[in-house]
Amino acid sequence: MRVGVLVSGTGSILEALLQAELPVALVAADRPCRGLEIAKRAGVATLLVDRKDYGGFGPAFDRGAYTRELVRRLADERVELIAMAGFGTVLSTEIHDAYPARILNTHPALLPSFPGWHAVEDALAAGVEVTGCTVHLATLETDAGPVLAQEEVPVLAGDTVATLHERIKEAERKLYPATVWRVIDELERKPTGATTAGEQL
Ligand code: GRF
């Protein structure tokens, strides 16, 4: 199974995926970032499809053209399963058509609570005592796909966005690799009713 990881930032979740020896064939980014450096150092193929070549971060961004190019390049590398790991671009329908139920994401909150880019800040502002992380299938609607795994993380007195996010990421670095492995195992399991040579009568 060839896994493509999408990153935009620090890449500490990517590091955990690599340490878990997942079959990462390619790391792709939407901007220059540390995640790409981590991949290079690990000897994994990298790809930068830079948003600034598609209108950048404002209203001029051509989401459809960006997504089509990314899908084309992922297909070129024969990527079969996508794991988003702190990827900061919402992609359009073409990627979901190309990879149905094969795009995973990790989110730093207990979905459906606190979707969106400011999940840790929002949980802190809401004053919850427990938040956490969610691994889910990505669908066209952001942070709304079927949940695959969740883990609770306590909010401690004196927490800042940075300290709380780091505690959540510690959980993500275990839960995400384990869940991606589980999905790979499920996808690679033989179809129901199939028999191997040794099982044939
Ligand atoms: C993680 O908390 C992930 O859930 C969120 O972005 C963060 C990525 O962290 N989508 P890093 O860049 O891998 O350190």
Image (tube, grey):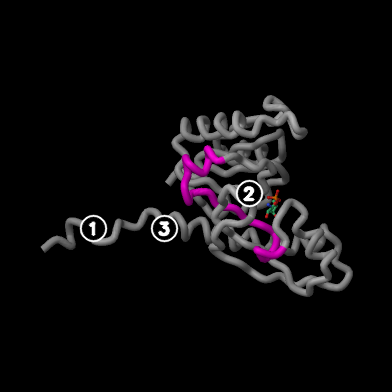
* Disc 1 versus disc 3: nearer the observer: 1
* Amino acid tagged 3: Asp
Q: Magenta residues, as a range?
A: 93-113
Element carrying mark 2: loop
Q: In this view, does 27 lie above or below 122?
A: above
Q: Nearer the viewer, residue 106 or 117?
A: 117
Which residue is at a point 67% across and 66% down the rendered structure image? 110
Query: Residue 8 lies in what quarter of the image?
Result: top right
Q: Which of marks 1 and 3 is nearer the N terminus?
A: 3
Tell whether circle 2 marks a residue whose Cβ is less than 8 angstroms from ligand 1. Answer: yes
Which residue is at a point 48% across and 49% down the rendered structure image? 102
The numbered disc on residue 85 is 2
* Amino acid tagged 2: Ala
Query: Residue 163 lies in what quarter of the image?
Result: bottom right
The numbered disc on residue 194 is 1
Element carrying mark 1: loop
